[in-house]
Amino acid sequence: MKVDYLTEGQTEVDRAEDLHDLLSSHDGSPLRVLGGGSRQLELPPASKSVRLLRLSGMNRIHRLEAADLTCSVEPGLSRYDLDAALAEKGLQLPCTGGGSLGGLFASGEPSPMTPGAHSPRSLLLGMNCILAEGLEFKSGAKVVKNVAGYDLQKLFVGSRGLLFVATMLHLKLRPLVKHRAHLRRRSLEISRAFEIFTRLRHKPEGVSALCIHREDDGIALYLTMEGRTRSGIASLEKEGFEECKLPTLLGGERQNNNLELIRGQVRVSKVLELLAQLPESVAFSCSGTGQFECQASPDLSDSLLRSTFQLGGQAEIRRAKAERRGLSTAMDPAHQRLSNGLKMALDPGGVLH
């Protein structure tokens, strides 16, 4: 694991009890929480020297209820190990993303979804947590239907570990589908590609992931089709789709070190307008819910941030040199006040960075 910000060593924790003891007696100096550390070069660098608090040793499955389609896991458990255990039971966690489970949910990373498809936010039923001051609390529940008060666990998704520390995640699962295929259709004109893209993102069932890429030879569509039979897959093959690898956004591909990776979100109706403002040589990808990624030079990154803001969206530089990573579109003032208020309420000492 590499980091490009100042650190003062690291502490590895294997049990929730040890984490509680550590935080309860902590002197208030800056900490950064991480699992395996695979996302550290995509997150804004720590603003000051920090001690790394590694939870990779908290990697156990505490409960796996196949009949209830739920499980409870520690945040350091890898996605690979969870998938292997679920496959033995004929189950799956129906969202994309790798690394540790805590990192997957805390990062809020994009997924090539369609409207109504599962996302990390929709799959997190509840959590056991610890505030930076050492106070333990629980949110949500272990089951799908509950009336356990406010869904504070939803704040964890996308929080990047800056609000509180997870010690247990209660997750919603789904049965493995009988038929699944990853399909693509390439070399499309842009108008034709968006016509198909719009139709497929509103398909009532079967399409669980959808993204559109700009490639060297035109626009390409990638999707994941699932179902009890192959009929849906066969119908798309008749339209010119062919089987391929799992569709990803650009973050899943090899990053060009001379370019920056920008991630953002706009309304799908604005994607064409945003794409029109980028040179044809720029790699661009957008999911069925308007989450986009783009690889661009620093100058073009700045222009893209401005364009995204003007279109009512938001974007952030996710892979770049440390001094550039984390630059983003302006946050709505109300959103900024809410964000600051949550940080002050949950981590008033500013321990988590």
Image (tube, rainbow, N blue to C red):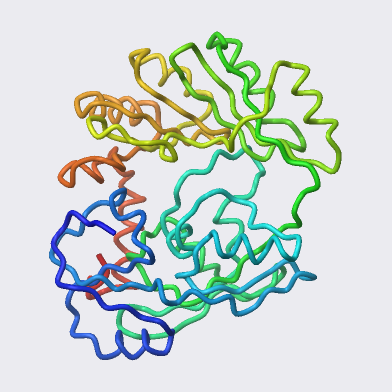
Tell whether 179 sits left or right of 182: right
Tell whether 161 sits left or right of 246: left
Above or below residue 19? Residue 158 is above
Q: Toward which corner of the image does residue 150 lie, by quadrant? A: bottom right
**Position of residue 252 measured from the top left corner of the image (x, y, whole percent):** 44, 40
Nearer-the-camera pick, 98 or 110 = 98
Kindly identify the residue that appears in the image at 55 percent across and 36 percent down.
Answer: 289
**Position of residue 299 measured from the top left corner of the image (x, y, whole percent):** 19, 25
Tell whether 133 sits left or right of 173: left
Question: Is the N terminus in the top left, top right, bottom left or bottom right quadrant?
Answer: bottom left
Nearer-the-camera pick, 61 or 28 = 61
Kindly identify the residue that appears in the image at 73 percent across and 31 percent down.
Answer: 203
Above or below residue 47? Residue 315 is above
Question: Is the C terminus in the top left, top right, bottom left or bottom right quadrant?
Answer: bottom left
Kindly identify the residue that appears in the image at 25 percent across and 24 percent down.
Answer: 300
Kindly identify the residue that appears in the image at 27 percent across and 68 percent down.
Answer: 32
Above or below residue 331? Residue 306 is above
Tell whether 294 sits left or right of 320: right
**Position of residue 166 measured from the top left corner of the image (x, y, whole percent):** 44, 73
Above or below residue 264? Residue 81 is below
**Position of residue 187 measured from the top left corner of the image (x, y, whole percent):** 55, 12
Nearer-the-camera pick, 235 or 243 = 243
